[in-house]
Amino acid sequence: MENPKITTTTGDESYEMFWNCDACGTKKLLGVTHRNCPECGLAQNANARYFPAEGEAVALKNHVYTGADWACDGCGNPNSSKAKFCVSCGCGNEGAKSVTRKTSANTSDAAPGQQSTQTSPQPVMPGAAKASSSGSFIKIGVIAVVLGILAFVFYPRTDTGVIKSHNWEKVIKIEHSVAKTETLECANVKSNMQVRDMKFVNKPQKMQDGESCKDVCANSNVDQGDGSFKVEKKCKQECSPKYVTKNVMIKLCEVEYPEWLMKREEKTAGQSTSDKMDWPNPTLQGKSTSGYGEERIGRRVESYRVQVERKGKIENCEIASLDAWRQFQVGQNVTLKSKVIGGSYCP
Ligand SMILES: [Zn+2]
Ligand SMILES: [Zn+2]
C-alpha cells in the first residue's frame, strides 16, 4: 500500500525509570521516587537510568511533569526542573544542561515498561560448524563422482572402419488443411476464423471489492528526563484488497478455421555421390468444394549417409556436410568416434 496511515499516540500514564546504585549495588531504584539511594544515600546518577524490563514497570500516580532534570555543573547531580539550586552541592542552575535521555527501540505491541534489549546472537552448538563442513565435503564428493561417471560415459572412444557405400535422401513434407472447430470468447476471434454460432453465458469473475485494513502497532518507551517515562504507541494501517466473485455475461463464438496437418511426404533418394540429387517436385492438390483439403509444402529434410563396416557390423552414419560426404571413397579406411558408451561409431 502506498502512503500507509501512521498514527502515534502517547499514553497518559507515566512510569518510573529505574537506576542502580553504584555505591552499594542496590538495583531497580525508582527514578522519580528515589532521588537518593534509600540504602546508602548516594545521589541518583541520571546516566544510570534505564527502562524497566517487561512486566516490571511501576506506574506513577498523578505524576506532574514539569520538564527534564538539569544536570549540576558542579557535582553532576540531576535536579528537578523546578529547583533553582542543586540539592546536593548548592550550585545554581544557570547554564546547566538537561540530563541525557535514554532512547528505546521499538518494542512489540505489549505491556508498557518493556526495555529495548538487543537480541543476542543465536548460540552456536559445538560441532554444528563441523557438521556443515563435512556436509559440504560429501557434496563435493558426490559432484566429483557424478562428473567422473559423465566423463566416462561421454569421453570419445575411437576405432577404425571401412566405408562400404553412400546414400542420400531429400524429403518434402506435404501438409493439408482440415476444418477445425473451437468455441472461444468472441473478442478473441481471428480473421481466418468463420463464426458458426454465438451464445451468451455467465462466467464467474473475481473482482476487487474494497479492501480490508488492520492496524499493526509497536510500542516504544519515551524518557521524559525527570526519572519517568511514557509509552508511545505507533500504529501503521495495513490494507489488502478484498475480492468477490460475480457473474459476468460473456459472448461465446463457435468458430471454424483451417488447420494445417502433415499429410504425406515425397522423396528422392540415391546411392551415388555423382547423382544430381534434385528435390522432389510434388503436385499439390487444390481446395475441395468444402473449402478444405488444400495442400502446401511443409518442411524440407535432406540427409547424406555413409555405411561403415566395423568389427563385421555395418553402421549407418549421417554426415553433416555434403562436401565431407562426397570426399568419402568406398573401400577407404576411416577413423571412427563414438561419443557415448554403446553409441554408434561414425567418422
Ligand atoms: Zn546505595
Ligand atoms: Zn551539584
Image (cartoon, grey):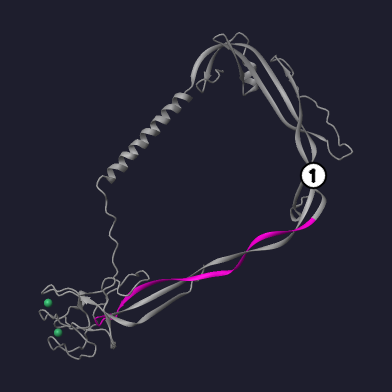
Residue 310 shown left or right of residue 145 in the figure: right
Which residue is drawn at the image coordinates 23% and 90% (left, top)? 82
User: Which class describes the residues within 10 Å of circle 1: few (<14), some (14-19), or many (20+)?
Assistant: some
Residue 262 shown left or right of residue 291 in the figure: left
Using the rendered image of the protein, determine whether residue 191 is visible from the camera's viewpoint: no
Q: Position of residue 201 (x, y in %)?
A: 75, 58
User: Which quadrant of the picture is home to ligand 2?
Assistant: bottom left
Instruction: Out of 111 and 128, give the one closest to the viewer.
Output: 111
Q: Main secondary structure of the magenta part?
A: strand
Which residue is drawn at the image coordinates 36% and 35% (left, top)? 140
Which quarter of the figure has residue 234? bottom left
Which quarter of the figure has residue 250? bottom right
Compared to 175, does 224 lie above or below?
Answer: below
The residue singled out by tag 1 in the image is: 257
From which residue to which does the magenta span run?
Answer: 199-228
Quarter that holds the C terminus: top right
Residue 327 shown left or right of residue 19 in the figure: right
Instruction: Out of 184 and 257, give the one closest to the viewer.
Output: 184
Q: Position of residue 33 (x, y in %)?
A: 20, 83
Using the rendered image of the protein, determine whether residue 123 is visible from the camera's viewpoint: yes
Instruction: Out of 334 and 284, give the one closest to the viewer.
Output: 284
Total residue callouts: 1
Magenta region includes residue 223 = yes
